[in-house]
Image: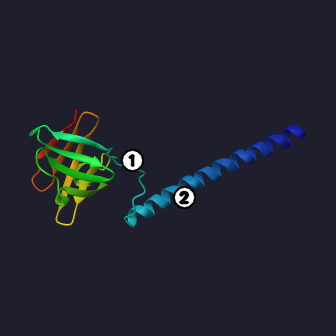
Amino acid sequence: MKKGILTTIIGIVIIGIAYFGIEMFEFAKGVKEDAQKNGIKLEQKPIVKLTEFKNGCWISTADSLSGIEIKNGKWIMFYKGMETDSSDIYNFKIRREYIKELGTEHKPFEFLTITNDSDTLEYSILEYSKELLSLSYIPKGNTLNYEPEK
């Protein structure tokens, strides 16, 4: 008699768990359909930190006298042999964009915007590593490559 009651209780628990699982699946499916109908995106994108530039000097691979110094949150453009003035010093911000039309919804582009009182320049960050800083100047599309100063 006790075995029968125990078997019945276990059966009811299993049926309850299965029912609850099916209901949750249907609920989640409904939430997803409603979100899609209303234009809400539920996809999770992996959390990847934005590029963080470290202090240092970078020399142009095209012109060894031209370079960039990143120092204390400032972007300083210089040309060896010429004095640097305030128009060569910029604040900078990095932002990330997913551009669906280009098929980059899973691999974002990072953009660098440098600004000072007289200018705003926009770049796409192509690469930033210990060996190379590669930027694409947005208006022209030309690539600027820099190596760390030795």
* Callout 1 secondary element: loop
Q: Earlier in the sequence, mark 2 or mark 1?
A: 2
- Amino acid under disc 2: Phe
Q: Position of residue 79 (x, y in %)?
A: 12, 47
Q: Quadrant of residue 119?
A: bottom left
Within-10-Å neighbours for mark 1: few <14, some 14–19, many 20+: few
**Residue at label 1?**
49
**Residue at label 2?**
27
Q: Nearer the viewer, mark 2 or mark 1?
A: 1
Q: Quadrant of the N terminus?
A: top right
Q: How many marks?
A: 2
Q: Residue at x 64, y 47 (%)?
A: 18
Q: Position of residue 44 (x, y in %)?
A: 43, 51
Q: Residue 121 versus residue 125: which sits nearer the camera?
A: 121
Q: Residue at x 37, y 65 (%)?
A: 39
Residue 99 vertical placement versus 38 (above, below): above
- Amino acid under disc 1: Lys
